[in-house]
Image (spheres, coloured by chain):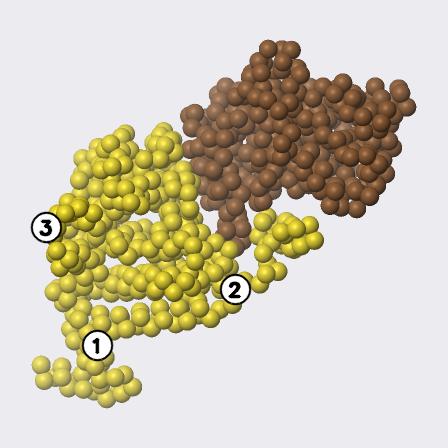
Amino acid sequence: MAVAAVLVRRPLEQVTVRDAINQGMDEELERDEKVFLLGEEVAQYDGAYKVSRGLWKKYGDKRIIDTPISEMGFAGIAVGAAMAGLRPICEFMTFNFSMQAIDQVINSAAKTYYMSGGLQSVPIVFRGPNGASAGVAAQHSQCFAAWYGHCPGLKVVSPWSSEDAKGLIKSAIRDNNPVVVLENELMYGVPFELPSEAQSKDFLIPIGKAKIERQGTHVTIVAHSRPVGHCLEAATVLSKEGIECEVINLRTIRPMDIETIEASVMKTNHLVTVEGGWPQFGVGAEICARIMEGPAFNFLDAPAVRVTGADVPMPYAKILEDNSVPQVKDIIFAIKKTLNI
Amino acid sequence: MRKMLAAVSRVLSVVAQKPASRVLVASRHFANDATFEIKKCDLHRLEEGPPVTTVLTREDGLKYYRMMQTVRRMELKADQLYKQKIIRGFCHLMLLPMQEACCVGLEAGINPTDHLITAYRAHGFTFTRGLSVREILAELTGRRGGCAKGKGGSMHMYAKNFYGGNGIVGAQVPLGAGIALACKYNGKDEVCLTLYGDGAANQGQIFEAYNMAALWKLPCIFICENNRYGMGTSVERAAASTDYYKRGDFIPGLRVDGMDILCVREATKFAAAYCRSGKGPILMELQTYRYHGHSMSDPGVSYRTREEIQEVRSKSDPIMLLKDRMVNSNLASVEELKEIDVEVRKEIEDAAQFATADPEPPLEELGYHIYCNDPPFEVRGANQWIKFKSIS
C-alpha cells in the first residue's frame, strides 16, 4: 500500500540559542534511554539559565537529576556512569566551577580510552556556559577553551549560533568520547533563524569542522563563540570601505579544522584570530603556530594577528570590563593593521 | 574396609597414568565442608552484622587457596621484575601488607555481573575479576600482550565489570558511585564495590560521593582497605578519626578483619544483600596488617625483635590462616596444597617468561586509541614532521 509522504516546508523559525540547546537535549533524551542530564538546578529549577526548561517535567527524576553543590563528586559520578554504559550530560553551572572537577574531566574521562588500550570508552558530555558574562567579575568570567583544548582524548566544541548549538549538542551526545561543550551565557537569549535541515531530529553538525560564515577575499578572520558575531559586524562595517573579510566560525576547538583556515589564508593572504580568552597559550596562539607550520605560511603577506581578551582577571566596573573583552572596534583596528591600512 | 581397598586398587589399576602420590591423595577421604568461627564485625548504624560462623566447602577452599597463592606469587614476581628494572615507574604491590584475602574474599562475596573499582594497588583485583596472570605481567612489563596493550601499565588495567586501576587518589570513589548509579538506572540488581585506602579516606570528593550515594540510595559498597599507612604517614598522623567505618556518618558501616578471607567473604555477602535490597550504600572497613601498636621507626626503642615481627606477620598471613583451617578440618591435605603451590609457581613462571619475551607495542601504534568509534586521523609527534596514525 503506497503512502504518500507530504513534505511540509515550515517557515524559517527564529530560535534562541537557549531553546536550540533545549531542543537538542530533548530530542536526544527521547531518542536514547541511556541519555540523562545531571547538574545543579537542572531539574526542578528548569536550569540556572533555563536551558533545561521543561525537561524534568517531561522525563522525571530518573533522567533529569538535581545534584548537590559537589562538582568534583558529581562529575566523577557522571564519568563512572558513562564508563558503565550510560550516556550522561554533565552540566557545570559555569565552566569556572569545572575547575573543581577538572581532574575527573581530564584524568578519568579524557585519558581512559587511551590508557586502557581501547577497552574502556567514556561517552560523556560536559556542558555549560563558558567565558565572560556581564558584570560577574574575575572568578566567574574565565574562558576554558585553551585549557580543555590542550588535552588529547577530549573533544571540545564552542557553538556560536542556534544552528551550531543544536547540531553540536546532538553530535556531542551521540559521540562515544568525552565532549566538552562551551556555551555562552550572553548568547543564550539571542535568536537566529534555524534553517529547515536543523528542524530534523537527526540534524547533526560534525565535530571537527569549521564553517565559513561569510565569504571574503582580503583577510581571513577566525573566531569561536560570541566573538563570531562581532567579526561579522566588523565585516559589515569594513565592507562599506571595500574590504571583504572571510569570517570563519571555528565551531570545534579540538580537533581543530586547520585545513579550512589554511585554504582561506591561501586565498586572502592575511589572518586575524579573535577569541574571548586570555592571549597567552590561547586558541589564537595555536592557530598561528599551526599556520606557520603548514602550506599557508608562504601565502601570508603580513604576520598573523590575534585579538583576545585583555591579559587581566576580569574587572567589574563597566568601563573596565568593556575594555577587557574584544570589541568590534578592536577587531576592525587589527584587520586594518594587518592590511596596512 | 577390605572391600573398599579392593575397589580402590581396581581404580588404581585403571588410572595407571597418574603418579602414585596423586592417586593416593585422590583416594583419601576429605570432608565436604567445615564450619568455622569468624570474628564479629564492629557495627555502625546497623542492628545486625554478618554471621559469626560460616561454612567453607572443600571446593571453595581449594579455589580460594589457589587464587590467593596466585596473587601472592604474581606480586612476588612483579617485585622481582621491578628490582631487575624490567618493570618501570610505579609498581604498587599487595605484599606488605598481605591483602590477598581482600581481593579474593570480596570476589567470593559478589557475582561476576557485579562491578568493582579500586585505586592503584590493583593487580590482585585485575586477576580476581578475570584477567590472566600473563596479561597482567605483560602489561607491567609494557608489552603488546599486556591487557591494555602496554598503554596503561601498573595502574591502568581494565576488565569486564572492572574499572581499573586508577592513579589519582580518591578519584575512583565518585566513579564507583557513578557505576552504582548506572546499576540502579538499569534496574538489574547489580552492586558496585568501590575501594579506597586509609590515606584516600580523607579526600573531600569521597564525602561528596557518600552524600550523593546516600541521597539517591545508590547500590554502592564503599570499602576502605586500612593498612594503617598512607605512603609514609601513619593513620594517627593523617586522620582526626581513624574509625574509617564510621566516617560515612549517615551511611551504615562495618569493620572487618581483612586478613581472614572468610570474614571478608561473609561481610561482603552481607553488604551486597544490604545494597541489593534497595537500602542504599554501605561502608566496609577492611583491617589489614595489624602491627599491634609497634613502630619500627621508633628511635632507640627496640622492644620488639625481628623474630617477633616475623611471628606476628606469620600469624596474620591470610594464606597460612586458610591453609591451617583447611588442613586441621580435613578439607585438604598438606600435600595437596603443596601441589597447588607447584602449579601456581609454574603458571607464574610461564607468565613471567611471556612478559619478558613478548615484544613492546609497535611504535606505529603510539597514536592509537585516542578516540572511540572515530575514523582514522593523524596525531602529532615530537615535531611537525612526525605524524602517527590514530585509529580507534
Residue at the spot of label 3: B303
Q: Chain of mark 3?
A: B
User: Label 1's element?
Assistant: helix
Q: Amino acid at mark 1?
A: Ala
**Between residues B173 and A260, which one lies in front from this camera angle?**
A260
Chain shown brown: that is A
Residue shown at the point (48%, 44%) measured from the top left: A83
Give the mark nearest the N terminus, 2 or 3: 3
**Between residues B250 and B205, which one lies in front from this camera angle?**
B205
Mark 1 in CB contact with mark 2 (< 8 angstroms): no
| Residue A57 visible in image | no
Q: Position of residue A196 (x, y in %)?
A: 76, 30
Q: Position of residue B279 (x, y in %)?
A: 31, 35
Q: Amino acid at mark 2?
A: Glu
For the residues carrying marks 2 and 3, which lies nearer the camera in this image?
3
Q: Amino acid at mark 3?
A: Tyr
Residue at the spot of label 2: B360
Q: Position of residue A313 (x, y in %)?
A: 57, 21
* Distance CA(mark 1)–CA(mark 2): 44 Å
Q: Is residue B243 left or right of residue B77?
A: left
* Distance CA(mark 2)–CA(mark 3): 50 Å
Residue at the spot of label 1: B26
Q: Chain of mark 1?
A: B
Q: Position of residue B319 (x, y in %)?
A: 22, 60
Q: Residues within 10 Å of mark 3 (few under 14, many from 20)?
A: few
